[in-house]
Amino acid sequence: MKVVICGAGQVGYGIAERLSQENNDVSVIDTSAALIAHITETLDVRGYVGHGAHPDVLAKAGADQADMIIAVTLFDEVNIVACEVAHAIFNVPTKVARIRAQNYLAPEYSDLFSRENVPIDVTISPEIEVGRLVLRRISFPGATDVVRFAEDRIAMVAIECMEDCPVVDTPLQQLSELFPDLLATVTGIFRNGKLIVPHSSDQLQTGDLAYVVCDRDHTRRTLGLFGHEEQEARRIIIMGGGNIGYFVARMIEEQQPRMRVKLIENDRDRAVLLADKLSNTVVLNGSAMDQRILMQADVQEADLVVALTNNDQINILGSMMAKRLGAKSTLVLINEPAYQGFAGTAGVDAYINPRAVTISRVLQHVRKGRIRSVYAVQNGMAEVIEAEALETSPLVGKALRELELPDGIRIGALYRDRTFIRPDGTTRIKARDRVVLFAAADAVRHVEQLFRVSIQYF
């Protein structure tokens, strides 16, 4: 696949890195010569210095032969125009744009981005995607990660196996026998820096991070089975009142009115605006690293501090100060990959990688076959994929024990007629089933083949 990426910042670099690793033909455009020099020196991609919305620059980057353009510059308007030019002049089939301003995405303008109006096939709002992830993490405090699939009926939960985890040293197959009515399947294990796609005879060990696919309504029970029975936070402090912080506070007001939320915003004008927009949230104007502001927010009584500013250092240091002053737990937004490696040793309880969220949304539209959703884990070591089985799929009709699935793939759940099905050896996949599976990075191409659209289908 030939892909043109506009924007060589953190998100653009991450997308280019992933696509180039999969032997795609990637061209990257950015106005910064330094960013282009860095990306071409470190990745197998072509770089072009210029404006991503200018036709001549797109032409040099090979837009006339591109299968997809991905516009992820820092400016919405540049991303929009780049897609319009790619459509009008170069007839690029698939156009993806990052849109940050929520005004463009308001429900009353839902038909704005369409072939008849502004021809963008996929809009990605990192703030909304990250905000939803934050809300899921707040709802399930024992989980390291939570993602939804299949019309929100299936969840993938990442769970750390602590020393008191009841299910360690037990074969996975035996777990299914011990808890036959629990709709959950362990599909992946991250252990000592390595990712494992387990077999039924494998066992979990203390320190493992288990990736479990389960029925949405069984999420809390699954966490409890792993020894995580943390109570949902009731007193929350949000550091940062940008798009993400505001979205999280507003959704908590709408969905969890019993939670008490206090929001700290450094910019006075922004703080005044938020105070007008939010009805039940206490908005404080000041620095998240100011001990007096934290004490004014009653940090010593906080169940959870969520650091969502645009500055990684402020997020990390502010959360460390909050913990020292008595906050029970912290959840931190970290953009820079170099900081994520030592977040745990710095006292950060959990962090969110916004770049990974955006890259996962892009991969969903890069994958071939009937792929409905993709979520990358452990910096791309594996993907959790939701795919639709067609009549021509080699998976359809056979019992799972009869299938010779490639190494690195484990099926976690089927979704049929709005019902969760936990797979076992006798399960047969039917056409139109949605299959949620865990796949190591080098097995993703096999997943695409298993769910490819054959010419016989038409």
Image (spheres, grey):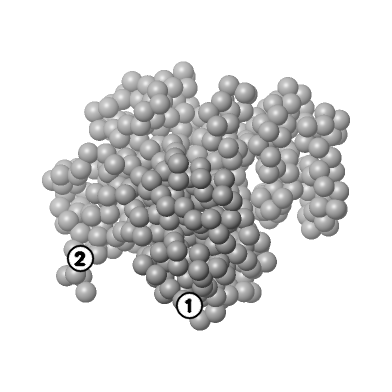
Up-down relation of residue 388 to residue 446 (above or below): below
Residue 93 picture quarter: bottom left
Image location of residue 91, percent across then percent down:
42, 74
* Residue 275 point in image, percent of width and height: 83, 53
Q: Is residue 304 visible?
A: no
Among the 4 quarters of the image, the one containing residue 237 = top right
Left or right: where 362 falls relative to 288? left
Determine the residue positioned at 23% across, 55% down.
449
Query: Which disc number belongs to residue 88?
Result: 1
SS of the residue under disc 2: loop
| Numbered label tally | 2
Residue linked to disc 2: 454
Residue 201 in view (yes/no): yes
* x and y, in percent, of residue 353 in the image: 55, 41
Label 2 neighbour load within 10 Å: few <14, some 14-19, many 20+: few
Quarter holding the N terminus is: bottom left
Give, as a three-letter code, the residue at label 2: Ser
